[in-house]
Image: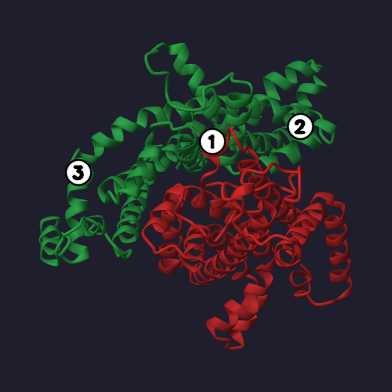
Chain colours: A green, B red
Amino acid sequence: MTRFLLRRLMQSLVLLWLVSIIGFAVLHLAPGGPLAEFTLIPGMTPAQLKLIAHQMGLDRPLPVQYWEWFRRMLVGNWGRSYRDSQPVLDVIAAHIGPTLELMVSSTIIAVVLGTWVGVLGAIRRYSVFDYLATVGAMIALSIPTFWFGLVVIYIFSVKLAWLPAGNLYTVGNGSFLDYAVHLIAPSVVLALVTIAIWSRYLRASMLEVVNQDYIRTARAKGVPERTILFRHTIRNALLPMITIAGLQLPTLLSGALVTETVFTWPGMGRLFLDSIGYRDYPVVMGILMFSAILVLLGNLIADLLYAAADPRIRLD
Amino acid sequence: MSAAIETSAPSAPARRARNRALARFVRHRLALFGLGAIIVLVLLCAIGPYLWIYNDLHIDIRHRFAEPFMGAHILGTDALGRDLFARLMSAGQVSLTVGFAAMAISTVVGTLVGTVAGYFGGAIGSALMRFVDAVLCFPSIFLLLALAAFVQPSLFSITLVIAATAWMEVARVVEAQIRSLRERDFALAARVLGASDAHIMFRELLPNAIAPIVVASTLNVARAILLEAYVSFLGYGIQPPTPSWGNMLNNAQEYLVTAPWLALLPGLFIILAVTGFNFVGDGLRDALDPRLDIT
C-alpha cells in the first residue's frame, strides 16, 4: 500500500513536471508572447518595449525563464498576475470556490440521475426505456454544453421565468436560498454529459455483476429479488464507478469553463478565459498547472478509494 | 469501412467474418441513421449554397430578425438580415472541413506516435506514452484555448490546434494494439526474414490495427466538430465574416430574448452532425470489434 502510494506519487510528480514543460512551451513559443499587450499601447516605442521585456525577464533564454519559474513554483511562488499584480495563487484561490461548488452540485445530480437511469436500463434490458436511455445518452454526449445552457436559459429564464439567467446571487440578496436557486441551472447543464457517461458505464457494470456466481448463489438461497438488487447487485456494480468518477475530472473542468461563461459564473473557468484575453501568462500557466494537479489528485484518490472499498483489489 | 475489413485475406472464414460484421452494422439502425444524417448534411452544405436563392453574405438590413418559417427566408434572418439557411450551409462547409481535416491530422499523428511507442517499447515507448499522459492531464478546452488564443486564427491554424488536442486517444489505442501484435508469430517471421523496423511497423503490424483506428477516427470527427464549436463560441476559433456553426452562436446569447432561433438552429446542426458521427463510430465499433460489445 505504502509502496503503491509512493510509486503513484512519483509518477504523478513526473507527469506534473512534463505538464509544466508542455504548458510553458505552449505559452512561450507562441508568436506574440506576453509583450503583445503592451504593443497595443499608443506611442509605445521599440526601446520602451525592450525595457519592459528586460524588466519582465523575457529577454533571457527560454530554458532560463522556465527554470526561474519552476524553481519559484516549487516553493509556492507562482508569480504575479500581469493584470493587477496579485499573486497567482491568491487569484486562483479567489475563483476556485464557485467552480468547486458548481462541480460538486452537478456531480451529485449526475450520480443520482445517472445511477437511476443506469440501474433501470440494466434490469429492464432491451426495454423501451433502455433503448431510449442508450440513444439519449449518445445524443447528450453530442450536445455542445454552451448550447444546452442557452436552451435552458431560454426555457427556464426567458419563457417560464422560473430561474435566474446567471450570476452567483441576486444583488442585495445574500441568502442561501437565493444562491441555491442560482446554482440549479448551471449545475444541471454541467451534469448532462456526466449523467450520460455515468449511466452507460453503470449499466455495463450492472450487467457484468448480474452474471457473477455470488448473485446466482444468492438467488439459489432464495434471497428476495429486491434484496439481491439493492444489497448485492447495485452495491457491487458501483465499485468500479469510483474509477470512472475520477477519470471524469478533466471533462468536468472543461464543461465548467463553458458553463461558467454562459451563466456568468465567476469561477476558475471564467478567470482562465479572461486571463487569456488579457494575455495574463502567469495566471494562465497557474490555472493549467492547478487543473492538472486537480486531475492527477482526483485519479489518485479514486484509486485509493477503490482499493479501500473493494478488498479484492491489492495495490502493490 | 470495407477498406478496413479487406485487409484480411479473402478466404472463406474471412468472408464469413465480413458478412457477420456487415450484418451487425446493418442491424445497428442508429449507425445507418447517422450515416444518412452525415450524407444529407455534407451534400446540403456542399451543393446547397449554389442552389439556394439567397447568398450567405448578402446583407438586407430591412429584413433583419425575420422569423423562421414565416416568409421567403425559410429559417429566418440574423441581426444584419442575412439569410440564416444560407449561412448555416456555408458555415457547415467550414465546420465539416475543419472536423474532417482535424480528424485526418490527429489520426496520422496519433497513429505514428502509437506505432513507434508500441513497436519499440522500452525507453522510447514509455517516454512517448508519458508525454501522451501529460497532455491528457489538461482539460481539453483549457489546452485548446491556450493554444488557439496565441496563434493567428485561420482555418488552417484552428484545424491544427484542434488536432493537437485530439490525437492522444488514437495514440493510446494504437500503442496497445501494436504492443500486442508485435509479439505475434507473423511479426517474428518478418523479423527473421530480415525486414526493416519500418517495414514491420507499417506494412505488417499497422494493417492489423486498422479497425480500432477507423473507429477512433470516426469518433474524432464528432469530437473535432464539437471542439470547433466550443472554441469558436468562446471567440478564439473561426473568425467572422467566415461563418462556422460555432461562431454563429458567438453572439446568439445577446439575442436570446428577441431572436431565439439564432441560438437554437446552429446548435441543432451541430448536434445532428456530431450525433451522426458518434452513431456511425459506435456502429463501426460493434461491427469491427465484437470484443468491445458491451450491450
Three-letter code, disc 1? Ala
Residue A122 — which label? 2
Label 3 or label 1, whichever comes before in sequence order = 3
Which quarter of the picture shows residue B209? bottom right
| Residue A289 located left or right of residue A120 | left
> Could you tell me which chain the residue with mark 3 belongs to?
A
Residue drawn at (49%, 21%), measured in percent from left and top?
A182
Above/below status of A47 relative to A213: below
Count how many numbered circles sit on residues in the image: 3
In this view of the protein, can residue A294 be seen by the observer? yes
Label 1 SS: helix
Label 3 SS: loop
What's the distance in space between the residues labelled 1 and 2, CA to CA?
A: 19 Å
Residue drawn at (61%, 46%), measured in percent from left and top?
B64
Q: Residues within 10 Å of mark 2 (few under 14, many from 20)?
A: many
Residue B186 — which label? none
Q: Are marks 3 and 1 on the same chain?
A: yes
Label 1 or label 2, whichever comes before in sequence order = 2
> Could you tell me which chain the residue with mark 1 belongs to?
A
Q: Position of residue B101 (x, y in %)?
A: 58, 67
Q: Are marks 2 and 3 on the same chain?
A: yes
Residue A80 — which label? 3
> Could you tell me which chain the residue with mark 2 belongs to?
A
* Dot 2 and dot 3 residues touching (CB under 8 Å): no
Q: Are marks 1 and 2 on the same chain?
A: yes
Above/below status of B151 relative to B83: below
Q: Position of residue A2 (x, y in %)?
A: 37, 37
Of the two numbered discs 2 and 3 in the rendering, the one whose residue sits closer to the viewer: 3
Three-letter code, disc 2? Ala
Q: Residue furthest front?
A: B62
What residue did someone put label 1 on?
A: A245
